Image (tube, rainbow, N blue to C red):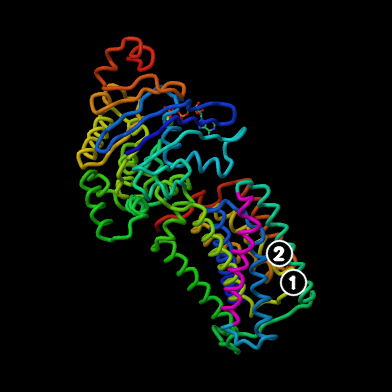
Amino acid sequence: MLEITNLTVCYGKAMIINDISLHVDEGELVSLVGPNGAGKSTTLRAATGLVAWEKSIHRGGDGDITLQGTVEFMGKRIEKTPAHEIAKMGLIHCPERRRPFKEMSVLENLKAGAYLLTEKNEIDENLRQVYQLFPRLKERSHQISGTLSGGEQQMLAVGRAMMSSPKLLCIDEPSTGLAPIMRTEVFRKIQEIRELGITVLLVEQEVSTVFTMADRNYVLSSGKIIAEGKGEELLKDEVLRKTYLGM
Amino acid sequence: MLIDILITSLINGSTYALLAIGFSLIFGVARIVNIAHTAFYMVAAYCIYFTTYRLGFNPLSAMITGIVFVSILGLIVYKIFIAPIREHEQAVLIGTIALAIALQEIMMLIFTGDYLSVPALIKGYATILGVKVFYQQLITFASVLVVLGLMRLFLMHTKLGLAIRATAQDREVANLMGMNESRVAMMAVVISVGLAGATGAIIVPLTTVEPFMWSHPLIMMMAVVVLGGMGSIKGSFYAAFILGFAEAMVVFLIPSGAFLKGAVALSIMILVLVVRPTGLFGVQFEEEG
Ligand SMILES: Nc1ncnc2c1ncn2[C@@H]1O[C@H](COP(=O)(O)OP(=O)(O)OP(=O)(O)O)[C@@H](O)[C@H]1O
Ligand SMILES: [Mg+2]
């Protein structure tokens, strides 16, 4: 479904992603883990058009942004496709740090998530589904989202992404900064989303939980994929576990 | 006297509100500090003068022509002049200053520096509490309220309005939601400049048309934006009336104080920047009541 091949991303002289290849097949839950600064977010941003967008507005800070390699989604090359068109294809990116539209209400955020949909029925159906998944959002639907708790904001971010009827949902660090109970809750919701038949690419640092959930995992370190496989197999590797996963 | 002050401040305040909201819109969505905003307002006024006297349009079609002309002009100027440098804030700032002066000089060349005027939509006046209120003043005030109401409906209840607010708050995430960020920015520019044109059209029967007519409203508009909080539409609304009132007080209460009216705005602006740099309503772009 998603096929990243020999992707390299440089911000100026710094090579952030160094020739990585990964793929996500339909129906899978795949995780991408690794330490801070490994390049996980950048990988997602490259796949969903944000790196190309940054490049187009020269926001790279010092030096130019270069993006090499190919990204394919449902058989189409998308490495040069604008972000909003990638979203239209069903590849949806739920960004790091939640980033709700802070001055809008919960409901307006969800409507913004359904921006690409034109059928009112589909929007209503998605809203019903999101509210079922996150009853909390329904209770809070008229609250200004900037005043939600961190956990609620995370639910909103995922709910907003779900509003667009994603085919592949990329979620960037949903558990970071949440209390343990909330983390468990968020992971349970991701499991539920997956059971709805949505393919998920999950970026996380909470390795122990993710490895039990995901079908396959990629471990990224300093811009390179250093291991891939099922959770239990990866955990057998002592060096990997100690050095890169901190377990 | 009090009624005079009230009427003047309501009318001036409401035009400052319209100007400031247009200015905030373009700043919020496209991060463009458009110094030429009130220059478009001036162009609309000239356009109405021209179509009324040289082409013989009736007042209403002259107004509509003015608004449409200015919106299209804004779009063209944005496309060829501002869009390519949009990510360089300083360049945009200098560019819009240059644009304002260029528009001023062009009007000067075409129409000379003469003071021109445009007839009222409805002549005559009513007497309210013993004070003469021209019908045109009432029309102007009512029109501003209608336009403000329509803007609110547009921003809160249409899909493009939603995209505009989303882009203003986080354009990267808006992009991820499938909103075409550069197209939304372009639409915001057209609406903003159209709003400047509409302000010009609404106010023109009450003011003199001349090539420097953009400078005083520019100062007032900036003061409104600073007082209300950059990017806050609600803030702009309240601040506009506060400043309109302060200005009217000075003009009416201080003998021959009219020359001080710019100073009032500037003093308030400086005071706000020193005491509370985020303005009355912080930096939020728009919020549910
Ligand atoms: N716009 C940018 N300009 C320059 N360097 C950048 C930019 N974005 C990211 N980087 C650098 O790229 C590296 C990888 O960042 P990235 O955000 O992808 O890491 P991450 O794996 O998501 O980390 P975390 O777990 O902390 O979110 C970091 O060293 C970061 O400083
Ligand atoms: Mg990250």
- Say whether disc 1 or disc 2 marks the residue closer to the N-terminus: 1
Label count reads 2
Q: Position of residue B175 (x, y in %)?
A: 45, 48
Instruction: Using the rendered image of the protein, determine whether residue B133 is visible from the camera's viewpoint.
Output: no
Nearer the observer, A163 or B260: A163
Secondary structure mainly formed by the magenta segment: helix
Secondary element under disc 1, as helix, strand or loop, is: helix
- Where residue A135 appears, as percent x and y from the top left, is 22, 45
Does mark 2 fall on the same chain as mark 1?
A: yes
Judge from the rendering whether residue A153 lies leftward or rightward of residue B222; answer left or right: left
What is the three-letter code of the residue carrying label 1?
A: Met
In the image, is residue B134 above or below residue A87? below
Magenta span includes B245: no
Q: Quadrant of the C terminus of chain B?
A: bottom left
Q: Which mark is residue A188?
A: none
Identify the residue at horizontal 57%, vertical 51% (top origin). Answer: B31
Density class for disc 1 (Cα within 10 Å; few <14, some 14-19, many ≥20) is some
Viewer-side residue, A218 vs B101: A218
Residue drawn at 35 percent across, 37 percent down: A2
Residue B107 circle label: 1
Give the magenta range: B62-86
Q: Quadrant of the N terminus of chain B?
A: bottom right
Disc 2 target residue: B215
| In this view, A6 is above or below A144 | above
* The image quadrant in which ligand 2 is located: top left
Residue B158 placement (x, y as % from top left): 40, 63
